Image (spheres, rainbow, N blue to C red):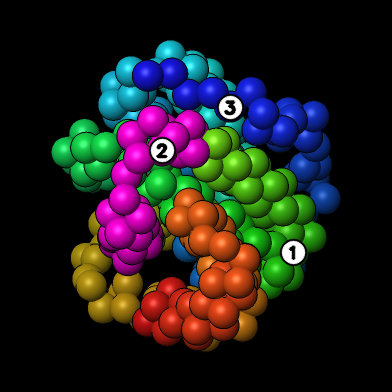
Amino acid sequence: MTADISRGGHTDACRWTIADLDLSRIEHNLVRDDWFTFYLVAGASFIETAADVYTGNLVRHFPDPVARDWLAKRWQSEELQHGQALRAYVEAVWPDLTWEQAYAGFLQEYSRLCTLEQLEDSRTLEMAARCVVETGTATFYATVEACAREPVLERLAGLIRRDEVRHYNYFRSFYQAYQAQERVGRLSVLRALYKRFTEAEQEDAYVGFKHAWLMRHPGGAFRDEHFAAFMQQVRERLRPHYPYRMAVQMVLQPLRLNRTIQKLAAPLLIRGARRLVFG
């Protein structure tokens, strides 16, 4: 089965490079002592740099040559660029910390979590799940962009956010093409969306934060209490900036509800998201 995304309306005109950031313009005094931001950016840099691990699983999972080609040649390269740019920012602001060593520890642990068994059996459902993951990344970077105090970080988060929204649109197009042939029931789609929404991000965040913490405290004894304290800061600092409406609208799209139902359901779902996202 080959996905048809010829009418997806996507464009690659917005491609950017690390050179567009001009790291020499970083206002170090605004971010150097902000360890909360360090944990956010360093943890994200690890996850994005591991793109080849989870992309490899997806390429093996999908026999569709169109999906495999886009995943391997476009999506992975852009995710890796995100990791390179975030790493460059971390190393520019916190040059005394060793990113490479911290990433090696992260990859050893994270790669054990990225298995083919985690993927949905149905190609349709896995593409729906990918829509949730891209919703999570797009809204995360939108939040970082909104609350960043340092201008170069704000710009970087905005560039990645736009990429992640574009990736979401590709995954949604693949989902729609598979769904047209597999005809998966809406309840099954809803279960897949909910499962990925409630499970995926917390695990990634934990491992990313753990190795960012160890990067700052080499040889230290990491404890779950450190992550709990970090998540309390996440709730306090990010919650006011999180785009709940954007998240709900993106998650609802694979369900293809009519506009009336979406309009009625959105306020309730936004209230639920406020509790669930930072619960």
Q: Residue at x 58, y 27 (%)?
A: 5
Q: Which residue is drawn at 50% across and 84% down?
A: 268
Q: Nearer the viewer, mark 1 or mark 3?
A: 3
Counting from the top left corner in percent of width and height, residue 173 is at: 55, 36
**Residue 244 part of the magenta-drawn span:** no
Q: Marks 1 and 2, how far apart in space?
A: 43 Å
Task: Mark yes or no: residue 17 visible.
Answer: no
Categorize mark 1 by other alpha carbons within 10 Å: few (<14), some (14-19), many (20+).
some
Name the residue nearer the viewer: 228 or 13.
13
Counting from the top left corner in percent of width and height, residue 185 is at: 31, 50
Categorize mark 2 by other alpha carbons within 10 Å: few (<14), some (14-19), many (20+).
many
Q: Is the residue under label 3 in contact with that under label 2 (CB below 8 Å)?
A: no
Name the residue nearer the viewer: 219 or 14.
14
Residue 74 lies, with reference to residue 251, above or below; the image says above
Q: What stretch is highlighted in magenta?
A: 174-201
Residue assigned mark 2:
179
116 sits to left or right of 29: left
Q: Nearer the viewer, mark 1 or mark 2?
A: 2
Q: Is the residue under label 2 in contact with that under label 1 (CB below 8 Å)?
A: no
Q: Residue 150 carries which label?
A: 1
Name the residue nearer the viewer: 246 or 224.
246
Q: Is mark 2 on a helix, strand or loop?
A: helix
